[in-house]
Image: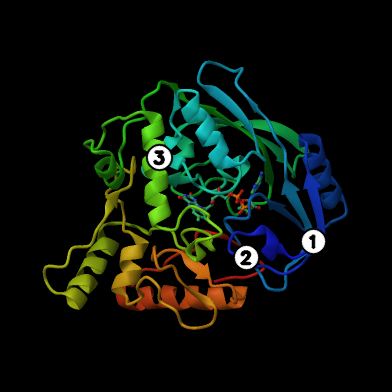
Amino acid sequence: MRLADYTTVRLGGPARGFVRAGTEDELVDAVRTADAAGEPVLILGGGSNLVVSDEGFDGAVIQVATRGVTRDAGPGALTVAAGEEWDAVVARTVAEGLAGLECLSGIPGLAGATPIQNVGAYGQEVAETITRVRVYDRVAGDVLDLPNERCGFAYRTSRFRGSDRFVVLSVTFDLAVQVLSAPVRYAELAAALGVPPGGQVEGAEAREAVIELRQRKGMVIDPADPDTRSVGSFFVNPVLDAPALAAVEAAARARGGPGTRVPRFEVAGSGDGLVKVPAAWLIEQAGFGKGYNPGDGARISAKHTLALVNTGTASTAALLALARQIRDGVRDAFGVSLAPEPVLVGVTL
Ligand SMILES: Cc1cc2nc3c(=O)[nH]c(=O)nc-3n(C[C@H](O)[C@H](O)[C@H](O)COP(=O)(O)OP(=O)(O)OC[C@H]3O[C@@H](n4cnc5c(N)ncnc54)[C@H](O)[C@@H]3O)c2cc1C
């Protein structure tokens, strides 16, 4: 098998071993067996945040295929097996009158991966509603429940990211029991819904609007849309302190004239003046527009500057060469080092 068949960007060489784990016991056993044999392990969900080397993975790929959703821990509580398809979970919560995940509609992948990078979009992130993550701890050899405060959630990261120690078995959310959405914080979504920021609409309406916005940006997987053959956003939005922002503003004015304004978002709860600057804006200002195509099979999406697309003939090496070109261009223009959002397997940027 080739991992390209299991990743949304359709890249990645062969795996030495491949196990599909359909139950929690099978998942834990597969990881235990590989660990006992000293074999490297790659846990595979929907493959929507993975960039795997052209040489593949010299170890055991364990595909999470566990199923089950239970609602027995309270009126808004929902425990979801790691292998459940994420968007189906969101659709179900909206249909059942639960609010808190509707803005995370249309994100590919499986529920078990959502805590890894604290999946977020349109003003919501899973850290706001996760109460507990059930994991297999490969160091202790035990299954344990980690409450939210022990998950180390922050913007696009958690204690699970960059560490192979925990295998997520299930995730418990506590959602508001209401037909209305959570307050819509994201300005673009609020405008699309015709409400002021902080306003509310029916959950189903919010879900529909999010999916429509995402489709326009090529951010909902669609085999008929070549701009969706990607890992979504390739770079995270850099978080800057006041001096770093001032340096970016100076560079932006030098490039674009004295009236140039650098867009930014407050980092919720940071309290110390940290702001997020859209990576897409920095990339565009550095000269890499939508559709930018150096000709090696990898290009920037025609719909979204942050998505790097495999046209069908790319290799992982070509995708990374493009990512490096963009990263270096932004660093030269603004002194900001963009960090990759996907998990890189067997390769570095
Ligand atoms: C078109 C598109 C749009 C996207 N939009 C967004 C977005 O709006 N917001 C956002 O945050 N992300 C977005 N993403 C990224 C991606 O969908 C999410 O990160 C998603 O949660 C990854 O899920 P997955 O099951 O595909 O994980 P995979 O890609 O299979 O794995 C990702 C990482 O998580 C690990 N992992 C997976 N499952 C488990 C588990 N059960 N236990 C332990 N480790 C595990 C893997 O080993 C790997 O390191 C987008 C991706 C695409 C392709």
Most foreground residue, 139 or 136 = 136
- The structure residue drawn at horizontal position 48% and vertical position 52%, both measured from the top left corner, is 220
**Amino acid bearing label 3:** Glu
Q: Is residue 196 above or below residue 292?
A: above
The Cα–Cα distance between marks 1 and 3, rounded to whole angstroms, is: 41 Å
Q: Which part of the image, by quadrant, shows the N terminus?
A: bottom right
First in sequence, mark 1 or 3: give its number.
Answer: 1
- The structure residue drawn at horizontal position 48% and vertical position 64%, both measured from the top left corner, is 227
Element at badge 2? loop
Q: Which residue is mark 1?
A: 59
Q: Of the numbered discs in the image, which one, if any, rests on residue 10?
A: 2
- The structure residue drawn at horizontal position 72% and vertical position 42%, both measured from the top left corner, is 65
Residue 341 can be seen in this image: yes
**Residue 169 appears at what percent x and percent y?**
69, 37
**Amino acid bearing label 2:** Arg
Question: Is the residue marked by circle 1 packed among few (<14), some (14-19), or many (20+) residues within 10 Å?
Answer: some
Q: Which part of the image, by quadrant, shows the C terminus?
A: bottom right
Question: Is the residue marked by circle 2 packed among few (<14), some (14-19), or many (20+) residues within 10 Å?
Answer: many
Give the residue at the far front of this rendering: 224
Residue 143 left/right relative to 249? right
Most foreground residue, 25 or 240 = 25
Give the residue at the far bottom of this rendering: 295
**Amino acid bearing label 1:** Gly
Q: Which residue is mark 3?
A: 208
**Residue 239 appears at what percent x and percent y?**
36, 56
The quadrant where residue 311 appears = bottom right
